[in-house]
Image: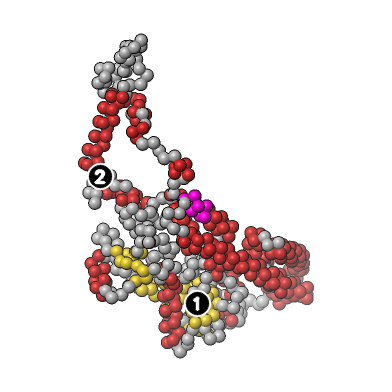
Amino acid sequence: MLPLEAIELDAFRQRHEQDTFWCGLLLGGCGLQLTTKLYTDRVCHFAHYPGPDGHPHLCGRRSRGVASADHLYVKASADAWLRARGTQAGFDFVQPNGVPIGSVVDIQLPHRRLRVHLDQEVAPDWDAEHEPVLGVSVPVDPETLIHRWYVHRIRLDSQGTTRRVRIGTEAFARPTEWFALDDCEITERGLSTPAVERIVQARSAPPPTRWSPGRKQEAPAQDVQAQELLRRLLYARRIKSTDLAESVCREITELSGVSPHLQGQLDAALRNASLWIEKEAETRQRLCADLNQAVANRRTRRVKSLLPDVKAATKADRTEEEEHAVRTATNYLAAVASAANERLDGLVADLNRLPANTDPQLLRSRVKQLCREANEIGKVGAHRQTEIALWSARARSLPTSSQTSSPPRPREQVPLHNQVGKAYWTKKLCPRCEAGRGQKCVVLGGDRAGRVRQLPHDERLQLIINEREERHREQRKARPVWQVYDVTCPVCSQEAGAWCLTPGKPHGPRRKLAEEYTLRQEPRL
């Protein structure tokens, strides 16, 4: 971490006088060399050297805060924790579907694998071989908590210039409990915390027997069992598990000796459950057929819209046929995304190879093709979005064909009466026809002598223009005006004269800083 204060940066530079600094690839950077920037009016920071054409270098790194290196802190902490227990693991910063590096960290243990989701770029897959560990911003639905008993979470707390890993355990209707990494273990169930041991023990122990002193159990065993079956059937419908619902229905049909009141409830529940199971089966069959047809017809958008519905409908008890449909659609989308990302990589590489004096019309057409390809893909990674936004902003800043073919006329060729507002035409005495203030100029010679002119004499207008220009010069001398690109941006650290790393307009704090310099009458350098 680079020190933020100027006095600390001086010591930092002396300590690392023989070192060089580079934009880290594992942080989503470009891999080029960096320099240190020392400021006294704002925080110090790393910066790229300018490009060969003198323009500021465009780096696609989306985040520069300490949290952008959390995946590296996770690897370092997990590696030290496992080595202390005599275990070695492999680490991989995977990028499914081209997501930014650092969103997912895979930890390969000798007999199992953990997948750490630090953000929401990749949805956790609960049916995969790996065990998901979710960041604090990754949502989880109640059905998953009920079905899995608990899920693991991870957070990183700042401690000085480093980050400390904390592991949490979240269960249904329980607050998340957080533990240091040293309090956790790897067991046969996977990653385990002290909270996991309590949850497993509570769920595995038999329920306590209810007893009321002085009272006998009035409800017969068959009625108690019937009520339990009704609760299980309701739970099966809530989690949309047709297999569990069919199993409960079979138990209901085999139950006998129930009181008439409960028997009526069981019969009604059986009828409703049978209709629901039949409807769910038809829905699942139709969804899978539509998904297979969309894949066969290579309708990518249709596949993207159907796949989440099929996964949700078949999550609890997926058949082999449904699993094949989901796997085929997932592989198809992965292939489409890979091909699209390759096309985008090629387009971006072509743009980067264009010389600085490229024809603006050619550059705009290339950028338009890049945006069109990105729209067809749908969701692209944050790094790619930044690149597209930067190229779009550069294309919009180029002059149009009308501007390049017909430049504006010089000020000397604009008629004087078009340079002065009509309300100011009579503000000065006319030195030619001697018309007074508030009076219009008159014709001096010819048949129309003495008549009012439609336009004032140029000599009169020139006096007004000269006075206005002199007034503006005096104002500029007395109070310098700072433009937005005259100052260094406090957000993206772009130097004076360089555009902000935003599409279309500068950052708001940079505009406010220019206004503040103008109000304080800061001298122009």
In the image, residue 299 lies at what x, y percent?
A: 67, 60
Residue at image x 28%, y 24%? 459
Q: In whole angstroms, how far apart are the C-alphas of marks 1 and 2?
A: 55 Å
The N terminus appears in which quarter of the rendering? Answer: bottom left
**Which type of secondary structure does the marked residue at label 2 adopt?**
loop
Using residue 123 as the reference point, say whether residue 229 is left or right of it: right
User: Mark 1 — residue?
Assistant: 92
**Residue type, numbered disc 2:** Pro
First in residue order: circle 1 vs circle 2: 1
Residue at image x 39%, y 36%? 409
Q: Is residue 49 above or below residue 209?
A: above
Closer to the camera in the image, 122 or 343: 343
Using residue 330 as the reference point, say whether residue 344 is left or right of it: left
Q: Is residue 270 above or below residue 412?
A: below
Closer to the camera in the image, 207 or 15: 15
Do we see residue 330 in this rendering? no
User: Which SS does the magenta portion mostly show?
Assistant: helix
In the image, residue 280 lies at what x, y percent?
A: 72, 64
Do we see residue 497 in this rendering? yes
Q: How many marks?
A: 2
Mark drawn on residue 326: none
Residue at image x 24%, y 60%? 40
**Which type of secondary structure does the marked residue at label 1 adopt?**
strand
Quadrant in the rendering for residue 125: bottom right
User: Mark 2 — residue?
Assistant: 480
Magenta residue check for 363: yes
Magenta residues (range): 360-367
In the image, residue 294 lies at what x, y percent?
A: 69, 62
> Which residue, as the protein is rendered here, is positioned at the far bottom?
86
